[in-house]
Structure formats: C-alpha cells, structure tokens
C-alpha cells in the first residue's frame, strides 16, 4: 500500500490497484478517472475555459471513451491524483481545479470534520461556481443539494433575477406560514420551480388563502399557477399581466366569476376551475385560441357564450354538475375535441351536430333529462 498525505485531514492511498481518498483516516471516495490531457483539436479556444468541468465538457464522447480506455499503471494514476489534489489544496480548495463531482463532496466532508480552510471557503465556492460555472455544474449543485448549504437569501440571490427575487420577497409578506418571515420564505422555496432566473411554476394550493396574492402578478415568466383548495372569491382582472401563463389552477375555491381580462391571456392552454360558484363565463372566452383543457365541473353555469364555440384547440372539456339547459348547434365547430363530460346538467337535447366531431372519442351525458339522445349514423 502506498500513502500520500495532502494535509492533516486529507490523504490518498493506493489499495488493490485503486486510488482511494481518506478523510481523517477514514475511507471516503475512490478516484475512478484521471483526466490526463485534452487534445487541442477538441478545444477551439482554451481562453474560454475556466475550470476542469468546462474542459471536460468540450471533449466529445468518443475522445472521452478513448481516454478512459488508456491503460494507465495504477501507481502512475495514483501519483497523478496525488498531484492534482495537492495543487487543489495549495490553491485554497479552488473547485475549478478538480471536477465538481469530487470537489464539492470532499469539501463538504472536510468542513464537517473541522478543516478550517475548507470551512472558510466551502459556501463561497458554491456561490462562485453557481454564478460563473457551466450549466452542467449549476445543475449538479442543484440536484446534489449543495445549494441547501447556503442561507436562504444567498440561495435566492443565486437562483432568481432581481425582479423575481423582489416579487418573491413581497409574496412572502402576503402569504404567511409563520410570524417569522424566514420560515415563510423557506416554505415558498418548496412551492416554486425556477428556470433561468425566473419563477416558472408557483403552487399555493391548500393554504387557506382568502384573497389573491397580488405579488404573483409581478412574476412575468410564470407558466403554471396553482391556487387550488383555497377560499378565493375573485380572480383579479390584472391577471392578464401574466402574459406567459399556460396553466391556471383555481379549482375548489369560492369564485363566482372569471374576469373578462382572462380572455386576453391568449397563451393559456389549461384552465382548471371546477368546484367553484361560477355562473357565467366571459363573453369573449373564444379568444383563447390555444386553450386545450377546460375543467369547469361542479359550478353553477347555465349556458355557454356564443364565442365558446371558437375554441378550436379545445381537446378536453369537463362541465359535469352544472345547470346547462341547452347546447348550440355550433358545438360541431370544436374540431379538436376528444373528451367531453356533460353529466348531471339540465340538458333535454343534445345537438345532432355533435356526431360530426370526428376527433371525439369520449362523451358522458348521463343524468340529464334528455328527451332525445344522439343516434350515430350507421
């Protein structure tokens, strides 16, 4: 067995032809791959490389496999790892100098066992590499949970741009989980999905909200908004400001109407608004030309507006447990409709034109006082 000591906390041993890292005398991780060199033909501009991670990413898969297949004597590989780790330590555990998959695991453990240098640089390295690292490095830090090592405000400053950061801070004041604002902000982190510095999904379901939190309207990149299972009575007309929104979930609230401005949200594809007290739909709902899924079961809807039949992209329509008395012959204009539920309404007649919707493969009209049912042509 060969052993090389980096410092009082970190050492490297060659055991049974494998190089293993030891921390405080305890085995920690096996070093499996030594990056010997990167062919110049694989990297057009070395000046753009800031870390070993970025260098490795610029090597194509074929060359990487060739490098892995090179027969390196175990002792040579051992001394190569020793050299790399010694340089890493001498440069203050700069995580650009070894691959992040190893660097952050080792740095975290060194911090836990009391290495003062590791303790001093650990969080700073996470922040530095997330701010300046490649997308793969950022993804690794997120998925491996290293961002959770940071204080909540440090984490949010890394993840969000200024506008979304400020909006989330404001939202934390409007959605109270705890008298102390910090637990509220921590809780909100589990309710959001972030991409490229913007909050793209926000889930505030089952929080006993009585009013619509206005800070939501500042999240311009929001794609999915979930407010199910609260006590909301209205949706503000300013919701039209969410110009990128694709899914709106407001089911199981106490909403009595949808604002006319919702018809300006032409990017929306799904509206889930069942289990409310909605009586009428906006007159211009047909403007939602990209709407694919509309769930309005268990409301108090009596009729559908004329523009409704312009929803040419609508694929799934759920209207059970309402008070609808009639359907227009224009129903056949819903050319994309595949799934339709109209059970438990007050329909006495179903338009014959319904059978002309060739895409329709499911229909439920049970529990209606029908006088005449649809007869499919033979």
Image: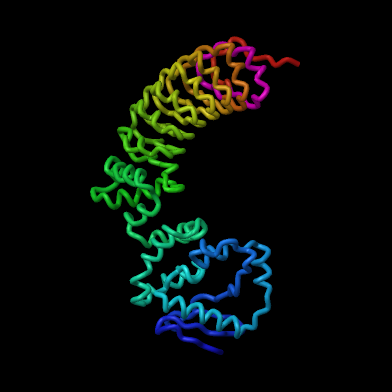
Q: Residue furthest right?
A: 378
Looking at the rendering, the stretch of residues picked out in magenta corresponds to 341-364
Residue at x-position 63% and y-position 69% = 39
State the image coordinates of residue 293 (x, y, percent, origin top left). Answer: 53, 29
**Along the line of sight, the residue nearer the viewer: 24 or 228:** 24
Answer left or right for 91 relative to 57.
left
Residue at x-position 65% and y-position 71% = 67
- Asked if residue 320 can be seen in this view, the reply is no
**Along the line of sight, the residue nearer the viewer: 341 or 75:** 75
Answer left or right for 304 relative to 154.
right
- Residue 70 location, quadrant: bottom right
Instruction: Name the dominant secondary structure of the magenta segment.
Output: loop
Compared to residue 249, the image places residue 363 above or below, namely: above
Is residue 335 highlighted in magenta? Answer: no
Is residue 360 highlighted in magenta? Answer: yes
Answer left or right for 261 relative to 359.
left
């Amino acid at each position: 067995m060969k052993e090389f000591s980096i410092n009082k906390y970190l050492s490297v041993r060659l055991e049974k032809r494998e190089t293993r890292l030891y921390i405080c005398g305890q085995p920690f991780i096996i070093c499996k791959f030594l990056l010997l060199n990167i062919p110049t033909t694989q990297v057009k501009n070395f000046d753009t490389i800031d870390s070993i991670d970025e260098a490795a990413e610029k090597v194509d898969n074929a060359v990487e496999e060739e490098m892995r297949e090179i027969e390196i004597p175990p002792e040579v590989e051992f001394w190569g790892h020793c050299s790399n780790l010694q340089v890493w330590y001498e440069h203050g555990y700069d995580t650009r100098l070894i691959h992040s998959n190893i660097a952050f695991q080792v740095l975290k453990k060194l911090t836990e066992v009391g290495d003062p240098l590791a303790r001093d640089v650990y969080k700073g390295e996470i922040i530095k590499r997330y701010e300046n690292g490649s997308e793969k490095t950022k993804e690794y830090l997120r998925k491996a949970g290293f961002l959770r090592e940071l204080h909540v405000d440090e984490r949010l400053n890394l993840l969000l741009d200024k506008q979304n950061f400020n909006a989330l801070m404001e939202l934390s004041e409007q959605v109270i989980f705890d008298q102390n604002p910090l637990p509220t902000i921590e809780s909100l982190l589990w309710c959001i999905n972030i991409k490229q510095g913007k909050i793209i999904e926000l889930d505030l379901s089952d929080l006993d909200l009585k009013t619509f939190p206005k800070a939501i309207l500042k999240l311009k990149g929001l794609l999915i908004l979930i407010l199910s299972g609260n006590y909301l009575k209205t949706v503000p007309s300013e919701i039209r400001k969410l110009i990128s929104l694709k899914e709106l979930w407001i089911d199981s609230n106490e909403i009595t109407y949808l604002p006319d401005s919702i018809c300006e949200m032409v990017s929306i594809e799904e509206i889930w608004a069942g289990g409310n007290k909605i009586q009428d739909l906006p007159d211009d709902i047909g403007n939602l030309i990209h709407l694919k899924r509309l769930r309005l079961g268990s409301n108090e809807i009596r009729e559908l507006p004329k523009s409704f039949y312009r929803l040419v992209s609508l694929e799934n329509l759920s209207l059970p447990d309402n008070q609808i008395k009639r359907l227009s012959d224009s129903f056949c204009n819903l050319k994309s409709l595949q799934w339709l539920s109209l059970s438990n309404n007050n329909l006495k007649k179903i338009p014959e034109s319904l059978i002309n919707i060739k895409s329709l493969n499911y229909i439920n009209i049970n529990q209606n006082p029908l006088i005449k049912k649809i007869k499919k042509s033979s």
